[in-house]
Amino acid sequence: MFDIVSFIPRAIAQSIPLLLGSTGEIITEKSGNLNLGTAGVMYVGGMCGVIGAFSYETSGKPMNGLLSVLIPVVCCLLGSLIMGLIYCFLTVTLRANQNVTGLALTTFGVGFGNFFGGSLIKLSGAEVPSIILTNTSNFFRTKLPFADSLGWFGQIFCSYSFLAYAAIIIAIIAGRTLRKTRVGLHLRAVGESPATADAAGINVIRYKYTATCLGSMIAGLGGLYYVMDYANGIWSNDAFGDRGWLAIALVIFTLWNPTTSIFASILFGGLYILYIFIPTGTNLANKELYKMIPYVVTIIVLIITSLRNKRENQPPEGLGLPYFREDR
């Protein structure tokens, strides 16, 4: 039988990297920057967190819970910030093509992670091609102490790490900021019509840089969560999969709304692991078909979204276009 109590926590845990990636990309795209390098940013964020955690675990010092969490998080944010700055310098300052730049960053991010991942594997002397950071992962995966005493309610709502709750809070704050604040209004104006925003006295360059770098840092946390929480502190090259691309698809699915992304990411997270919970017997072909479900749904959603004619369902008008102030 389908075990809903076990399925929901697994779906939510699977959804957190998607939620952080899509939230970061929504903030970026609201400024008019189309960063297809989100997958690479998440990869670099996860790898930088692993480098920080590996350095601390192998330092020979007693493990401190606060430092065990703080060091990987800071390293992750710095690595993701650098990726965002590289993207902005190329696309905003030098006005390079955003699509090409994003794809190049994805390739660079995967190569960065695989190179340093392989180097750390050699340094650790591991017999398997992976880095195991169990001590650091245990601190990241600490759940609320009263979760087990609440039965099914605790298992569904209280059995997650701090990064999972932080991802939801970040999405809610981002959604409210975009809709209800002056900063959000200015950011949306920059994405819709940078020339008009510039004429109104809004610093277009600053908003593009800030939104893209902030979005990259949030997306990078998705990579860190995957390694330290979902994968139990185990890094293997190319293990991150296609979550970065699914996060970009979620941006369109949620119509650029971070709050809606909370529920959409859980839906996609559930579809991603659905094949594990549906009995297929010895027929492996059916299991492979079930693995296709999230990608089929993604294609259907993109088709439906493209058919919507309402203006509020469309991306920012300035998305993906370089801004030349001289043309204003």
Image (cartoon, grey):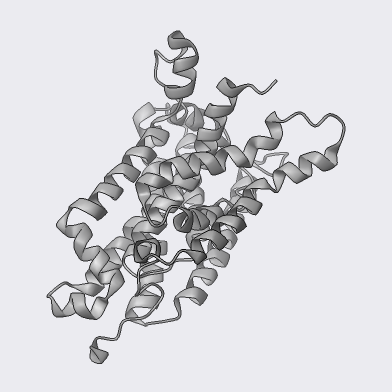
x, y percent for residue 110: 58, 59
Instruction: Answer above or below: position of 141 versus 14.
Output: above
Give the position of the N terminus as an image quadrant. top right
Quarter of the figure with the C terminus: bottom left
Residue at left offset 72%, top offset 42%: 290
In the rendered image, residue 16, in percent from the top left (x then y), is placed at 47, 40
Q: Give the left or right position of residue 84, taking residue 184 as reference.
A: right
Nearest the eye: 272 or 208:
272
The image shows residue 47 at horizontal and vertical percentages of 51, 50
- Residue 135 percent location from the top left of the image: 51, 28
Between 297 and 191, the one nearer to me in the picture? 297
Extreme residue in the left direction? 201
Q: Based on the displayed image, in which of its 4 quarters is residue 301 positioned?
A: bottom right
Q: Would you say 197 lies left or right of 157 here? A: left
The answer to whether residue 168 is above or below residue 102 is: above
The quarter of the picture where residue 149 lies is: top left
Q: Residue at x 50, y 53 (%)?
A: 247
Vertical side of 76 occupied by 140: above or below: above
Q: Residue at x 71, y 44 (%)?
A: 291
Q: Is any atom of residue 40 visible in this view?
A: yes
In front of the other: 6 or 96:
6
How many discs mark residues in the rendered view?
0
Position of 170 with respect to 243 (left or right) is left
The residue shown at (35%, 66%) is 311
Outermost residue, top side: 149
